[in-house]
């Protein structure tokens, strides 16, 4: 079931974010820099604030046991490249054991419908340049790579592709 996030979901969203982020990006151990980032960035309080923010929309995928994925959209994002709209799909996370069974697609479609409802012609997102699984997922669902930017933590920068989709021509 896909539904709008509620404040009571905040701790589940924080835990899911930590799980997915660590599983996706930290394959060779966890340094203090990344541990500090994850523990300060993915907090229940930050999710409660996000759920209450009128410029953000968050939907969750929920099974009989709890939340197994979510998508967050910002309608007033500052684009990293010229000609991008302010509609950003900020986060699309699905627990690894629930990937490849339609949850990510359902969440993505909900986010894109939301963007269309805001009158957008396109929406964009950032994805780690080394995350080939996510890149392939977005390419299959109508996104195109239009440039790159960087995720910076401490003194290191990690390339992220900027991908965009035309909301006027949905991909099945």
Image (cartoon, rainbow, N blue to C red):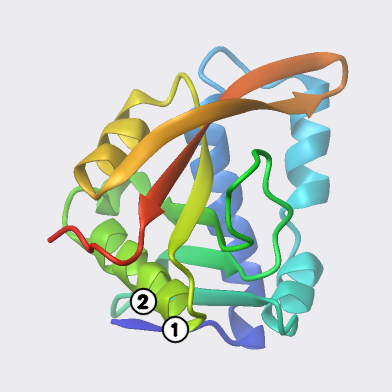
Is disc 1 in contact with disc 2, using a CB cutoff of under 8 Å? yes
Query: Could you tell whether 99 is left or right of 26 in the image?
Result: left
Residue 129 is tagged as: none
Give residue 74's quadrant in the image. bottom right
**Quarter of the picture holding the N terminus:** bottom left
Q: Give coordinates of residue 164: x percent, y percent.
A: 43, 46
Give residue 13's quadrant in the image. bottom right
Q: Is residue 66 visible?
A: no
Instruction: Give the Cα distance between marks 1 and 2.
Output: 6 Å
Instruction: Indicate the secondary structure of the residue bearing disc 2.
Output: helix
Q: Is residue 20 visible?
A: yes
Q: Badge 1: few (under 14), some or many (20 or more) residues near its Cα, within 10 Å? A: few
Q: Which residue is mark 2?
A: 113
Query: Could you tell whether 29 is left or right of 67 in the image?
Result: right
Query: Could you tell whether 100 is left or right of 90 in the image?
Result: left
Kindly identify the residue that appears in the image at 68 percent across and 40 percent down.
Answer: 80
Q: Which residue is mark 1?
A: 117
In the image, is residue 84 above or below residue 149? Answer: below
Q: Give coordinates of residue 12: x percent, y percent.
A: 57, 68
Label total for image: 2
């Amino acid at each position: 079931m896909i539904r709008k996030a509620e404040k009571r979901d905040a701790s589940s969203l924080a835990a899911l974010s930590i799980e997915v982020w660590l599983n996706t990006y930290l394959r060779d151990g966890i340094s203090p820099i990344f541990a500090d980032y994850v523990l300060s960035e993915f907090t229940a309080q930050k999710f409660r604030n996000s759920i209450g923010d009128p410029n953000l929309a968050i939907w969750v995928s929920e099974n009989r046991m709890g939340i197994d994925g979510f998508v967050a959209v910002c309608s007033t994002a500052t684009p990293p490249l010229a000609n991008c709209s302010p509609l950003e799909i900020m986060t699309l996370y699905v627990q690894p054991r629930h990937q490849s069974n339609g949850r990510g697609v359902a969440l993505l479609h909900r986010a894109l419908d939301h963007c269309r409802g805001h009158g957008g012609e396109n929406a964009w997102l950032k994805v780690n340049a080394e995350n080939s699984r996510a890149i392939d997922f977005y390419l299959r669902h109508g996104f195109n790579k239009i440039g790159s930017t960087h995720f910076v933590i401490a003194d290191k920068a990690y390339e992220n592709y900027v991908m965009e989709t035309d909301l006027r021509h949905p991909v099945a």
